Image (spheres, rainbow, N blue to C red):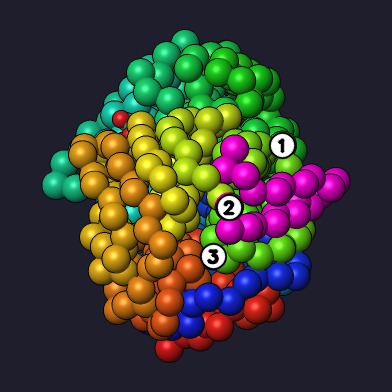
Amino acid sequence: MDKVIIEGGSKLSGKVDISGFKNAALPIIVGTILANDKCKIDNLPMIGDVYNLVKIMEMLGAKVYLDESGYMDIDTSTIRDPILIDEITRKMRASYYLLGACLSRFGEVKVLYPGGCNIGVRPIDQHIKGFEALGAKVEVEHGVISCKANRLIGSKIYLDVVSVGATINIMMAATMAEGTTIIENAAKEPHIVDMANFINAMGGNIRGAGTDIIKVNGVNKLHGCNYSVIPDQIEAGTYMIAAAAAKGDVIINNVIPKHLEPISAKLIEMGVEVAEYGDSIRVNGNSNMKSVNVKTLPYPGFPTDLQQPMTALLSGVKGTSIVTETVFEGRYKYVDELKRMGVDITVDGRTAIIKGVDTLMGSKIRATDLRGGAALIIAGLMANGTTEIEEAYHIERGYENLISKLLNLGAKVKEE
Ligand code: EPZ
């Protein structure tokens, strides 16, 4: 998908089904390495990052069958060599999960420094701190990371920053270590819990995921399992924001409302109607939305991955809203693109001051990263006239069937 073209102004209405969670699916696919066996995974999102990761797993030697329904059969017993020096791993952040998984299974690993969205410096010092605390020797040279350990020994690790990636990587590295590992100040996101449940389904012994203290009791060996990925909190949040932006009435199916509480609360504060039903949420937008302040935080705070779509919504809401991005230091690159549509946003470091405008104007703009691209889609739905979003491949990395889902909700949208 190179370009998305949107005719703005349509009210969204109807139902949309949410896909599997990208940020749970990626560590789960890599986590199958720990099993050294066959796993059956379903509810995987059919998105660019999953296709990319399948290529990476096949390059490592795994046998992978993936069908369009999101069902995967994967055999990692055929992986022999935990070394992959190939540009493909730089296309995505989640390739860093190869570190924890291979170190745990093989006692060694060598891969390129991970890539991913350009939203800040994104160091991996906390991952390395965890691996070293477990007894691994870690070297980073010429963009290559290599880790080696004769024996991983359980340890107490306090994370200096709440990191999703470091929490999951250390959980994997500690799964078959000798003794117990305690991860303190751990991330609590829903996908951390999903990953711990997956490892436990393979015979692991992880306790406390979802709290800031995780206990990993090392086990000798894991085995294959059948597992189903949780629904995507961020995809669901994006459609909730789109429904409000397009003043529509949308039912979002296949969600876990608890995971969406930070978003529901903010939309309700704006005066949007949000109602929860079992595994769906109904969002009813209107023209009297009021401006609010948003501060992104680790879960259960407002997710940083919805900062950009939320800012786009607020750019068309009367009054002044202040958005503070506390997780990443460079996550406002999309604002320059929104300015081409006539918004009034001033960015000062990690803060964006948004003065709502009556009308956004359709324009030619460019996606800067995955969620920045989602923000431009939201703006295009709100705008007068036609918006053309170039480099739309960024968006395809994390949203399954975006165009057909929006068309089903009554949006005037197409891809080129
Ligand atoms: C994960 O990235 C997600 N990516 C991101 O989603 C998400 O924005 C982020 O978590 C926060 O929720 C995947 O799951 C693949 P972090 P990650 O480690 O693991 C600093 C999307 O749009 N930090 O929780 O890279 C870091 O720089 C993507 O789907 C260190 O300083 O995020 C950041 O400021 C974008 N040292 C903060 O912690 C470290 O070793 C949180 O980062 C690790 C992180």
Please tell me which residue is depicted at 26% across the width and 62% down the height of the picture.
339
Q: CA distance from mark 2 to mark 1?
A: 26 Å
Q: Which residue is mark 1?
A: 258
Neighbor class of circle 1 (other Cα within 10 Å; few <14, some 14-19, many 20+) is few
- Determine the quadrant in which ligand 1 lies: top left
Name the amino acid type tagged 1: Lys
- For the view shown, which residue lies furthest in the bottom direction? 416
Given residues 302 and 354, the one toward you in this image is 354
Q: Is residue 46 left or right of residue 72?
A: left
Q: Indicate which disc residue 288 carries.
A: 2
Position of the N terminus by quadrant: bottom left
Rendering coords of residue 403 (x, y %): 56, 78
Q: Is residue 12 above or below residue 78?
A: below
Q: Which residue is mark 3?
A: 399
Position of the C terminus by quadrant: bottom left
Closer to us: mark 2 or mark 3? 2
Q: Earlier in the sequence, mark 2 or mark 1?
A: 1
Rendering coords of residue 139 (x, y %): 23, 34
Name the amino acid type tagged 3: Tyr
Q: Is disc 1's CB within 8 Å of ligand 1?
A: no
Q: Indicate which disc residue 7 carries.
A: none
